[in-house]
Amino acid sequence: MPKKKISFQCSACGYETPRWMGKCPSCGAWNTLEETLPPPEEAAGKNYKQRGGQGAEETRMRDIESGSQSYVSSGISELDRVLGGGIVEGALILVGGDPGIGKSTLLLQVCNHLCREGRRVLYVSGEESARQLKLRARRLGAADSDLMVLTENAMDQVEEKLNRVQPEFCVIDSIQTMYRPEMGSAPGSVSQVRESAAILMRYAKTTGCAVFLVGHVTKEGALAGPRVLEHMVDVVLYFEGDHQHEYRLLRAVKNRFGSVNELGIFEMTGEGMMPVQGASETLLSQRAKGASGSCVFCGMEGSRPVLVDIQALVTQSFLQVPRRTADGMDTSRVMLLLAVMEKRAKLKMYCRDAYINVAGGLSLNEPAADLAFCMAVASSYVDRPVPAEWAVMGEVGLAGEVRAISHLERRAAECRRLGFTHILCPRDSARHVKPIEGVSLHGVDTVAQAMAVLDLMPSS
């Protein structure tokens, strides 16, 4: 009996090789080559072939009818914001996140709303039974809806039901559980996920049915399966958040119908995922006033200004190498700014531990948060609080200079709405902003000037 040949397949791009390698030669990813067995003889004997094309003819660009893009509301304002206005006809949307973060709960709420609007919706579950879905629907108040439920993970059967039911909206929970019986690989493998997604993409584009795909994530936080999956879909949404906190953040990593910078904030309750309307008020509601090491920053999440509390704790270090811990900010950026504070602001950080936290679970990536971070560190260092009515924003360079930022007028309007009357910002940005009633803009050129304005200079 001949010995079966074992091959290795990259879980990121699908590259196959007869021997294991640490780095994939095709996509360059490390430790992604997984051992795979050849398909069984009965499956290989069927001579599985890909489907033929649609036989479409070429068309000149000027002859294509553009039409107007129509959006259907999901019934959840925060989800509509992230999607760019609503659900687009024929869109293929991938929703990823950690287990238990709320993906299935949110989509079941969307299905319930669409059914109440008279839409035909099919929920395909490859992980849960119909009884389990009924229990969740009862908790969400959707037990009496007209939602059609199909518990199946064989892709041929799912495609047959889709052609028979002809739904307007469809949810596949999850894409990693779907498989084609003709293919010898196991469900969740690169070939199975890629082929299943291709079938659903073809169905969505030819019928106009909007399809939601629930995707698993790896321990590194990336979507499981081949990377080509994210290229095939129209929208990629990521759920973020800590299971110990009630707030969940929904970000668009890719969106062919809108901006990728929008952020949706949800609160996990017993009745499901509830949108949080006043994001700034929620994130600042438990701020410790009068405490050192706290500074308010107004960031831009897409078109929405959001106020967050940046916290810093600087303490005497008894270690040979001081500890640096950052939650919500890039660690390398934190190390860079701490070096700037030591060189340009004369703070002796070489013998002090620094702990950084962005309250509320947000992740700040924009450089405009640099100055607020530096002021929080200086406040904790001298043990004097930043005045409660001040908000701080600005980018900091290696020379200690404060660089201009965008959307200062919109940030200032949000600060005024929440009662902040003074804003510390780059001088160059303050020059190009019209006077705002009730708000005083204080422009600075360097970090040392900002510390002097807030009375955070260390005593010599």
Image: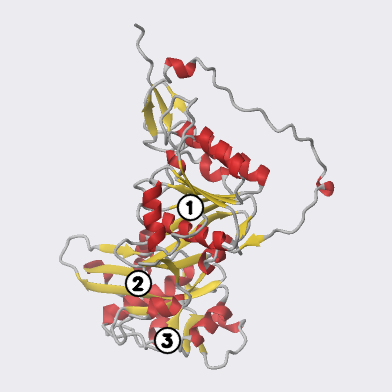
Give the label on residue 359, or none. Answer: 2
Q: Amino acid at mark 3?
A: Trp
Give left or right: position of 394 versus 375.
Answer: right
Instruction: Tell me the tag on residue 390.
Output: 3
Residue 336: quadrant of the picture: bottom left
Residue 4 image point, x, y percent: 37, 14
Q: How many marks?
A: 3
Question: Mark 2 or mark 1: which comes first in sequence?
Answer: 1
Residue at image mark 1 = 95
The residue mark sitting in front, 1 or 3, is 1
Mark 2 is surrounded, within 10 Å at the Cα level, by few (under 14), some (14 to 19) or many (20 or more) other residues, namely some
Disc number for residue 33:
none
- Spatial CA distance of label 2 from label 3 is 17 Å
Q: Mark 2: which amino acid?
A: Ala
- Give SS at disc 2: loop
Q: Quadrant of residue 8?
A: top left
Q: Is residue 198 visible?
A: no
Quarter of the picture holding the N terminus: top left
Q: Nearer the viewer, mark 2 or mark 1?
A: 1
